[in-house]
Image (cartoon, rainbow, N blue to C red):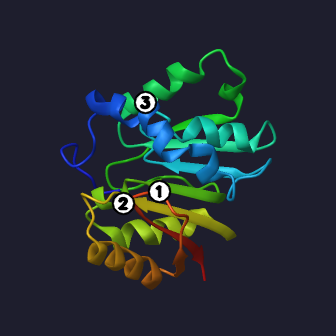
Amino acid sequence: MTLSKTQVCPVEYSGGLDNRLRRLLYKPEKILKPFIQRGTIALDLGCGPGFFTIPMAELTGSTGRVIAADLQQGMLDKVRTKIKGTVLEKTISLHKCGSNKINITEPVDFILLFYMVHEIPDKTRFFNEIKTIIKPTGSILIVEPPIHVAKADFRKTLETAEIAGFTASSGPQIPFNKSAILKPV
């Protein structure tokens, strides 16, 4: 994922990524429900403190699985603390990405890219690696924030994904955000 620690949201700010106000604004279950059913194998890439990871695991049920992946061990430790001693420990696996590679080889049905693609300098490399992870029938939800990502930049990101072998269509309406669904061609 070719990131430097200065480009990603630091662990110290993780409270801003998982709080009641954010839960009211984004309603994780509502956003994820169209993409995740019982038995789904899902990847929460750039999972942070697990804001979406836990609702994903609840939707996949005991027959599914969620891979919570992040570049920062501190974020994964926060997820570990939340699920320790719960049934979700069996459903959620934690994965630390390398600085230049996601390093996941297991095919997945769904990938969530929420507020993280703008942090990736080499998007071509990133989408080429994503292409090796997503199942041919899978889907990817990409959501980018309004302040960090201009409309033209989001369009350019989608063009990069299309060159890597995806089709892009409109994503769900998430207030003030840009979203798209990517499917492998």
Q: Quadrant of residue 27?
A: top right
Residue 136 vertical placement versus 17 (above, below): below
Identify the residue position indicated by label 2 in the image: 117
Q: Amino acid at mark 2?
A: Val
Residue at figure coordinates x 43%, y 85% from the top left: 163
* Number of other residues with Cα within 10 Å of mark 2, as a class: few under 14, some 14 to 19, many 20 or more: many
Q: In terms of depth relative to the viewer, which is nearer, 101 or 84?
A: 84
Q: In the picture provided, is 61 more to the left or to the right than 133?
A: right
- Disc 1 to disc 2, how far (Cα)? 7 Å
Percent position of residue 43, x then y: 57, 50
Alpha carbon separation for disc pair 3 and 2:
22 Å
Image side of residue 90 versus residue 7, left or right: right
Mark 1 touches mark 2? (CB < 8 Å): yes
Report the residue at 37% width, 54% height from top: 116
Which residue, given by chain and number where applicable, does mark 3 sit on? Answer: 19
Q: Where does residue 94 sit, x and y in percent of width and height? A: 54, 35
Residue furthest to the left: 6
Q: Which residue is mark 1?
A: 113
For the residue marked with disc 3, what is the amino acid? Asn
